[in-house]
Image (spheres, coloured by chain):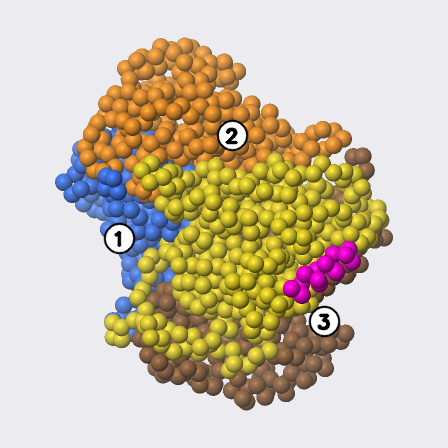
Chain colours: A brown, B yellow, C blue, D orange
Amino acid sequence: MSFNTFGHLFRFTSFGESHGAAIGCVVDGCPPRIPLDQKDIQRELDRRRPGQSRFTTQRQEPDAVKIMSGVFTDERTGTQFTTGTPIMLLIENVDQRSKDYSEIKDKYRPGHAGYTYDIKYGIHDYRGGGRASARETAVRVAAGAIARKIVPGLTVRAALVQMGPHKIDRSRWDWSAVDKNPFFCPDVKQAEFFEGYLDGIRKAGSSCGAVIEIVAEGVPAGLGAPIYAKLDGDLASALMGINAAKGVEIGDGFAAVAMSGIENADEMRMGNDGKPLFLSNHAGGILGGISTGQAIVARFAVKPTSSILTPRKTVDRYGRDTDVVTKGRHDPCVGIRAVPIGEAMVACVLADHYLMHRGQVGEGTAWPFKPGA
Amino acid sequence: MSFNTFGHLFRFTSFGESHGAAIGCVVDGCPPRIPLDQKDIQRELDRRRPGQSRFTTQRQEPDAVKIMSGVFTDERTGTQFTTGTPIMLLIENVDQRSKDYSEIKDKYRPGHAGYTYDIKYGIHDYRGGGRASARETAVRVAAGAIARKIVPGLTVRAALVQMGPHKIDRSRWDWSAVDKNPFFCPDVKQAEFFEGYLDGIRKAGSSCGAVIEIVAEGVPAGLGAPIYAKLDGDLASALMGINAAKGVEIGDGFAAVAMSGIENADEMRMGNDGKPLFLSNHAGGILGGISTGQAIVARFAVKPTSSILTPRKTVDRYGRDTDVVTKGRHDPCVGIRAVPIGEAMVACVLADHYLMHRGQVGEGTAWPFKPGA
Amino acid sequence: MSFNTFGHLFRFTSFGESHGAAIGCVVDGCPPRIPLDQKDIQRELDRRRPGQSRFTTQRQEPDAVKIMSGVFTDERTGTQFTTGTPIMLLIENVDQRSKDYSEIKDKYRPGHAGYTYDIKYGIHDYRGGGRASARETAVRVAAGAIARKIVPGLTVRAALVQMGPHKIDRSRWDWSAVDKNPFFCPDVKQAEFFEGYLDGIRKAGSSCGAVIEIVAEGVPAGLGAPIYAKLDGDLASALMGINAAKGVEIGDGFAAVAMSGIENADEMRMGNDGKPLFLSNHAGGILGGISTGQAIVARFAVKPTSSILTPRKTVDRYGRDTDVVTKGRHDPCVGIRAVPIGEAMVACVLADHYLMHRGQVGEGTAWPFKPGA
Amino acid sequence: MSFNTFGHLFRFTSFGESHGAAIGCVVDGCPPRIPLDQKDIQRELDRRRPGQSRFTTQRQEPDAVKIMSGVFTDERTGTQFTTGTPIMLLIENVDQRSKDYSEIKDKYRPGHAGYTYDIKYGIHDYRGGGRASARETAVRVAAGAIARKIVPGLTVRAALVQMGPHKIDRSRWDWSAVDKNPFFCPDVKQAEFFEGYLDGIRKAGSSCGAVIEIVAEGVPAGLGAPIYAKLDGDLASALMGINAAKGVEIGDGFAAVAMSGIENADEMRMGNDGKPLFLSNHAGGILGGISTGQAIVARFAVKPTSSILTPRKTVDRYGRDTDVVTKGRHDPCVGIRAVPIGEAMVACVLADHYLMHRGQVGEGTAWPFKPGA
């Protein structure tokens, strides 16, 4: 059962609403004796934090994380380590603007989870989305900061590769550009274009979607638990579970459909280091649900923000037709801040599978095998 | 932990290899007293069975299923019911052609799971894919046949909507056509085109991909267990876990990215039946991970079959460069037979969430609510 | 995977160490719209709290619980309800006496978990037991307070029925006495004897064990998920997982071994209310892992507190022989405060199984059946 | 969720009824490349098989097991290995005597699960117990035979230590005697007494209970996943889940209650091999839910067989008072055949925890630690 717990061996249980006292999570199953400082987590949270440019919501949430359990400081060295027991991360909510919600209190906002939560639970938490708020994703980023420390040599990076109908030019991909523009965009030139584009969207009282691509390097070959906990299956679930996500791809994704089997084959040759070398990576680093050792490449589509200033037809919880406008401080493109969230979820999936693989298979076998052995 | 178990409350555990004695599964958590006959399951299996047209593999697998446990026959009526205990479904393998594998025995086929299974487990089951074979998907179809009986009023249908680069014309969508052409294609005209197209692909020693769309109608509103067992998250995992799947979409999927927030909003009005009416379904029937009551629409992309007659560069398990050709009876487009598999997986996810919802919420609340109540 | 999560549909994830910032838990899967106030939880915590008599540790832990998420207040009525989303309960640690641990810092205390945690995790949290401290059990009591509200009509009570070698006289069993003596003892006369007995134990620098009996009434028939989540199997796990527990019994338990099959049979007759009446309850309310509708009776044995003032031989974490004395404020009989913990764990198991049963079976069938129907 | 799946990383899913076509299980999560032959499993099954002496049921169930998947034979050596994928074990039912059940068809047998299954599922499988039959335990023994191969150096043995009110004399404990008498009794003299005792019980149309003790040696220190998957918690669940079990103890169990804390402390000294030596084992090899490296000692109580020839009062499924006699071939003491079952369950728990520990902690730390390191 998952509900509010993500993962199997490395897993975290999330709690909290956008307008409650706090959000946070309990990270369980983390290996012991991993150096872990509050700063390691804060650094990642700061990347997702709102209000860092005019293109994200102006809410001021410092998202200051506290480690409440599961660590121990070595007296001699002063280094703080994980203990192998649950790590509780707490982020108090501070910017709960006491605004007047009376106007939208009983109305459902099209595209929002307000309606479905009310149908399911009989509760309408009109204050900023409640549990369904994107605020919860801070917790994922925090858990992901711990996950990143588990697989030796792993690097997980992500970038925004499309905004509205506008894709980046992949020939201009520059990882170092990603953290230098407000869109996490690896194409400097397209990032400049996005500034004007998004200003226009916002002024029109509308919003737009985005595509985020995550690349994980240093993934050991052999991770993945077929048939029903395949690495790509778990990645798909992790990414589709991000707020507003509507699509997920691994490797060439939907584009692979139009390719021939001849083109799509990732041919192999032995590398000079005694490891196999793939001549392409259409598969995105996963075959049969198991990592190949190549970079893992995944993408997810984020729909346009549903909180918009343009009035839309709706009903209220008493079954009456009405219209609704969502005022307030909303991101015109929630896909931007989804970039560090995507990274975090991929890091969590990989940490989890790393531990599961080690559990079942231990140190594994030495490839290549010896003929006749 | 999943590994070879799918689902939470309604779940099945799969076993078997393509060239072993049998494949099958144990379905656990099924409600009791549901009428279940072997024919109910066989009917679904027959739709996935190979060798039914020249466009699928010519292997002759009758895929005859036996119910080995978990049912009880009412003596008076002769009706067979589920008992609430594990239902074991057994499909014996009969067409294990004793061909000579010596040529490819130690070679990896590009795009196949052979390499990753060997890296992970140190075992190379060269005989037709072993556990990673698409043969395992028969088990999913069998489990899905039971799942279909759990949610009252549920209908799950699927169709092939793209083959290679060629999409169907959605204005010609005809559900009744789907079972009347060898491609499960709802566009009769495009199905005719596919015949020639696929013949060409096969003659070229190549293969092509496909996109499958699944539509589930009669889904009660309120199904889904946020945040980490969202209905769309579980659907994504279920569909991405199908052999050769590389992408998954819910509702408008990746196309939603290019829409404005104004267009993308699924506006609501009260229907004459006292239920809310959505004026569009961009969301594909899911908001915040919970079903809205609209039709659930999902799609998945299947890559071109990797078993092709054209030689490809590879290595063997002893670390030597070599070339490989995959002879044998392979589907030029595995996406075709993925249609009933996609249906089955969606049915299983919905059955599981139906039971989970009933567990947590019981009969639920009566919407719309009474003002002042 | 459980580790620090207890339960399946109704479940809680615990965190915190005895000498960290806080302990607490996240309760997930709770049905929505259940009235829940902080006082409901505090009341139960107060029963377990130390320092309420001279027979328990004199540490002053107010164990003040805060509900940090998962509730919503109805504006009209002012009633606070569960929302169906995670309920985070936080208990801050206040009495972390900054004593000098240097003497025992590297030594293992016989019978304590210090040695095994160090072997497993490579971390020695010498400060009061760390994660293995009985302080964690406050969390279980808090979660149990929520669990008690889930099964309609359920009452779970417990009592101490043996201390050291001294059993109570069951003919004097008086539930109303339980909360009126410092031992949760239902036999007033034996409770008086226990005062002097336990004073003697403490003066001798020793400790003693106890047996706790839990009785759950109002349990619907049909709860339990055979074969490997039987109600008695889950109760056994829940009770054996309590700190210092060494034995668990259901119904007559070990005493049933010495009975004949003729005596042990719980015969049945139809009651006047149309329900079956059992003429005895040797089975403790469970047959085949499923509740019968009778009272569920379980017992668990708690070993003598291992923290004692008498020096014991041990080794330190550097592999050196040494002796250890455990000073500090310890319960001479931890079994006393285990009474509300046992109640809480039983309530959690029953709430979980109630939801699982409802998930699989719904409202169930109306017994007795109609002949010929 | 468990229901019919036992374990976490090493786990098996069981299926089948006593009078259906077959019973069996799917073992999932087994490490790859473990030599596994059908004989390894059959040997264990033969120990549990009925009809081997006049003291167990005379049903003739050969319990011939077939490995249906999950193994691969090395062509050069002929050795059969596990592949890391699901191992399906099938045991066909052969002795389904077509007797006339009409007399008891609608009646519940006191102490049987027939009543509770009917209340829960609305199905009364009167034929020999259906899913609740002890026949299912053959599956556990089969899975246990695989589990035994996973933890290097592990030995799990069990013995009957009490029958009815008669305990063995522990000073006469002889492991080599266990497989040489029909009671798995380690006390030869008491085994002789049991022959006459049990003949008397049977002649009286009654039955008796038993206590079984399991000793696991070679268990690495550090196994166990606190707080809610403690090793003793999981053992308790595993043993209490065995048919007719009513009590479980670890180490001194209920007897520890009467001991003083001074006596109960398992003192430690360094052994000559650089490992810690415990001077006693009251704890039964587990502290804080984690193995100490000592022998793990567990016991469980089995109630008298409820199927007896003496008439008992009962009701039928239509709510009518009646009497019932259970004819047929029943064990007068089901506790005897529970001995190999107890062994198997303990082996499964240990294998599971071995893999979970390896997953979270890897190879772990080298104890003792270096001072100042």
Which label number is shown at residue D91?
Answer: 2
What is the span of residues highlighted in magenta in the rendered image? B192-205
Residue displayed at 70% across by 81% down: A190
Location of mark 1 (residue)? C152
Find the residue positioned furthest to the left. C272
Q: Chain of mark 1?
A: C
Q: Is B199 contained in the magenta span?
A: yes
In the rendered structure, the answer to whether residue B4 lies left or right of residue D330 reads: right
Residue displayed at 34% across by 12% down: D199
In the rendered structure, the answer to whether residue B140 lies left or right of residue C145 reads: right
Location of mark 3 (residue)? A175
Circles 3 and 1, Cβ within 8 Å, touching? The answer is no
Could you tell me the amino acid type at mark 2? Ile
Report the magenta stretch's main SS.
Answer: helix
Which residue is at the front of the view, C136 or B97?
Answer: B97
> Whole-percent x and y of residue D348?
52, 35
> Whole-percent x and y of residue C81?
31, 65
Residue displayed at 67% across by 54% down: B55
Could you tell me the amino acid type at mark 1? Pro
Between disc 3 and disc 1, the foreground one is: 1
> Whole-percent x and y of residue C286?
31, 37
Between disc 2 and disc 3, the foreground one is: 2
**A370 up-or-down from B208: above or below:** above
Q: Secondary structure at mark 1?
A: loop
Q: Residues within 10 Å of mark 2 (few under 14, many from 20)?
A: many
**C271 up-or-down from D157: above or below:** below
